Image (cartoon, coloured by chain):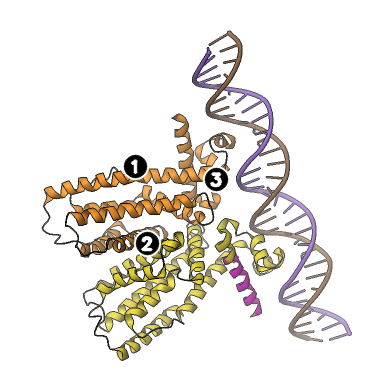
Chain colours: A orange, B yellow, C brown, D purple
Amino acid sequence: MDHEKQKQKIAEAAWRVIRNEGLEQCTVRNIAKEAGLPVSSMRYYFSNQSQLFVFATKHLIDRIAQRLETIPYTGVPFNDLKLLLEQFIPLDEDRQLEVEVWHSFSAKALHDPELQPLNEEMYEDLHQIIRGALRLLTQVNLLKPDLDLDLETERLYALVDGLAIHSILLPDKFPPAKVDAILTHHLEPLFLHRDSQDNFVMEEISKALKAYRLGLLN
Amino acid sequence: MDHEKQKQKIAEAAWRVIRNEGLEQCTVRNIAKEAGLPVSSMRYYFSNQSQLFVFATKHLIDRIAQRLETIPYTGVPFNDLKLLLEQFIPLDEDRQLEVEVWHSFSAKALHDPELQPLNEEMYEDLHQIIRGALRLLTQVNLLKPDLDLDLETERLYALVDGLAIHSILLPDKFPPAKVDAILTHHLEPLFLHRDSQDNFVMEEISKALKAYRLGLLN
DNA sequence: ATTTATTTGGCACAATTGTGCTAATATTTA
DNA sequence: TAAATATTAGCACAATTGTGCCAAATAAAT
């Protein structure tokens, strides 16, 4: 237990090094310094540097999954869907760290066979989360019935990741309001009669959506 | 002149190293080996490694700009717009190299003050290209008149970059037909009466679009 | 209390890194 | 042809890299 906690602390130190100095500066010595440990103590927990990176990536996925479970849903599906999607966009420091670190890891994964499976896992998870949300909203007749779910999922997922990338590369150009406006504008045509939403029913749907998502992550 | 050609050959060798082995393996020695030169000969052209990366990035931008000028437009604006956007998506080996290298560079640029300006330049250029295309299509009454051009540009650009990223990270999941379908589905709602297009007029528009874009790049 | 196991800490080594320095060769210029 | 310049080539050095090895300290267990 404590052992696992220490590994997580080291992984989080690795995140911060990547966030502050970039992946090429993410050396065992810099991570140890950031974690406040001697190098060899760190190597007790991770004998390979490769293991450390893999663990740090998994831990990052866990943190995102954990935040997904505590989204303060409003009960209005349209807004809740946006809330869900915005978890993957750097709208605060936590998410900014996640996206930046993920951006670095994904580039590394292209040539690191140990990271490649995690890369695919991340894609599949997010894909299923978004697809599940759209499917649920379709099942309760909130989305237009003739939507191509797979197509809309790929399109929406690409949009979200694109916005995330653009936001970390040019943070000044993407204030939260702008991101929200783009998402709103993208999602609106997917919905049926947004005005006639019954809030009580919507809460039920929101809960179902959350339950569905949890089932996907565990 | 020959001097410049040699610098370009070295820069292209750097691309290939990044493409084949990743950014962390893009060392002066590996680049020199790939270029078939001794290390010190390479250092005659680039005294700093930093200069090499900056030049390699600029050269990459140049190559993309050059390809944009030779797009085999069909004369049908809807298809030509797709053709334009698809230049930024890894649908062949050339574009795959470009996106992969750019992906690595952009991650590095977050912590490399020398690369940061190029990063912004790349974003601005693509943004203006896409915005210019949408604006032109609006001016000739092919797009719906009430579109928010800035919003649609950011949305479309994010979609394109998201598709590009997803395509390089999971190439098997994004065959060209799928990318095309997503783009088609995204662009269709932006257009007015796609059926009633007069091909002669369209060719003129296509030429104008090309001229406009050239003006932006030079 | 003594023996285990767990964790922390220090040091060293081989490999690789970017880069500086100088000589040799080829090319151009006068 | 002679001189100057441009280019190629080789070597070395200090710094940094991941990692192996072993001792000290702490905690747990018998």
Residue B133 higher or lower than A155, as above or below: below
Determine whether, in the image, residue B5 is placed left or right of residue D10.
left
Determine whether, in the image, residue C21 is placed left or right of residue B215.
right
Give the residue at x 35% y 88%.
B203
Q: Which residue is mark 1?
A: A218
Label 1 amino acid? Asn
Please name the predominant secondary structure of the magenta segment in the image.
helix
Q: Given the image, what chain letter belongs to the residue carrying mark 3?
A: A
Residue A85 visible, this orientation: no
Marks 1, 3: nearer the viewer: 1
Q: CA distance from mark 2 to mark 1?
A: 27 Å
Give the residue at x 56% y 68%.
B56
Give the residue at x 27% y 85%.
B197
Q: Secondary structure at mark 2?
A: helix
Q: CA distance from mark 1 to mark 3?
A: 25 Å
Q: Quadrant of the C terminus of chain A?
A: top left
Residue D23 higher or lower than A209, as above or below: above
Magenta segment, which residues?
A: B2-15
Q: Secondary structure at mark 3?
A: helix
Q: Nearer the viewer, residue A78 or B218?
A: A78
Q: Is residue B181 magenta?
A: no
Residue B58, image x, y percentages: 53, 70
Q: Secondary structure at mark 1?
A: loop
Label of residue A162 in the image: 2
Residue B160, image x, y percentages: 38, 67
Q: Which residue is mark 3?
A: A50
Label 3 amino acid? Ser
